[in-house]
Amino acid sequence: MDYARSETLAIKILVAGGFGVGKTTMVSAVSEIQPLHTEELLSDRSAAVDDTTGVEMKLTTTVALDFGRITLREGLWIYLFGTPGQDRFWFMWDELSIGALGAVVIADTRRLNEAFPAVDYFEQRKIPFVVTVNCFDGARRHSPEAVRKALALPEHVPVVLSDVRDRDSVKEILLTLVRHAREHAPSLTA
Amino acid sequence: MGAEEDPGPLVRMYAVTGGRARPIGEAFDVVAVVTTLGMPYEPVGLSPEHITVLRMCVRPTTVADIGVHLRLPLNITRVLLSDLRREGLVSIDRPVASAAAMNERIYQEVLNGLRTL
């Protein structure tokens, strides 16, 4: 097959939110593959370099990175990356967010405050994002407007009620995000 | 290795790159698309991992998928890919933002693709 003739593009979408809020569940719901797992190595600058190994940096730990893939056609993919939840991994967000089409922030109404760091992050970097309220069984239902108010979201940021275990529900979140990104991408509005 | 302590998986991983931790040349994204341009006649200096990448990327493949396939962390994967790029054996697309590559036609294609998923 002549790949050179078709345009290849991998679109990156980030999935953020507090620990255990359903990031991996959401990725699993639409990914054509079991969420893949890779790792990035972290350097610890305070540690001495071990001369015997010849390793340039002293590497002390790894951070897990989970992602899923949706193939829209040969050469056009969406990659969903669950962002590491812990604060000390913000630097990973910096790399992942470069060139990202947008982000989904999953909020749990029982601990809405855990969505703030992600909301602030994407707002500051002008990365288009939507907030989805995961309404799984037994969770208290909130109106999107109440969530918007609680998170102090600007009017243009979409808030979607969802069940992140449900494929159609997640498709709707992604459609909302892509439409939103099309309207609000910095490159188009600049 | 005998009674010696296992140096650990990190050291083994770096053995793959000869101890190098940073890729050569222009930085590339985790979803940059890698395409094999040619197989070397004599794979001198190439590791089994390099050869695996060349076979894999006959079909254009993203950096993230290559990392998973090699079971190597992304920084190690990037070092290997930068070696192959330097040798002219692979091309690495979109060294910058994929969002910048979006246009109305691709947006439509993505929306339609998601709807019919």
Image (tube, coloured by chain):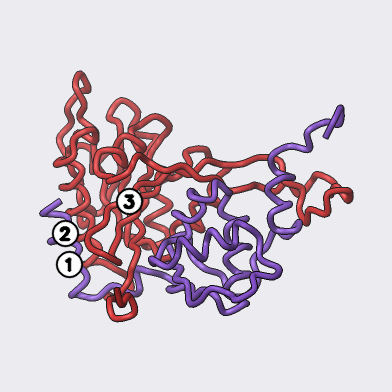
Chain colours: A red, B purple
Q: Residue at x 56, y 70 (%)?
A: B27
User: Please, what is the three-letter code of the amino acid marked with disc 2?
Assistant: Gly
The amino acid at mark 1 is Glu
**Placement of B34 over or under A31, stated as above or below:** below
Q: Amino acid at mark 3?
A: Arg
Spot the residue most to the front: B41
Q: Is residue B96 above or below residue A97?
A: below
Q: Name the quadrant containing residue B20.
A: bottom right
Residue A138 - label = none
Report the residue that reaches farthest toward the top: A138
Question: Marks 2 and 1: CB-CB under 8 Å?
Answer: yes
Dot 2: element: helix
Category of crowding for the residue at label 1, using alpha-carbon neighbours closer than 10 angstroms: few (below 14), some (14–19), many (at least 20): some
Q: Relative to A91, is A108 on the left or the right?
A: left
The location of residue A185, given as percent across then percent down, is 29, 68
Q: CA distance from mark 2 to mark 1?
A: 6 Å
**Label 3 crowd (10 A; few <14 / some 14-19 / many >=20):** many
Q: Residues within 10 Å of mark 2 (few under 14, many from 20)?
A: some
The residue singled out by tag 3 in the image is: A69
The residue under label 2 is B113
What residue is disc 1 on? B109
Residue depicted at 14% across the width and 42% down the height: A168
Q: Residue at x 37, y 56 (%)?
A: A123
> If the image is split into quadrants, where does the N terminus of chain A sit?
bottom left
Q: Nearer the viewer, residue A86 or A80?
A: A80
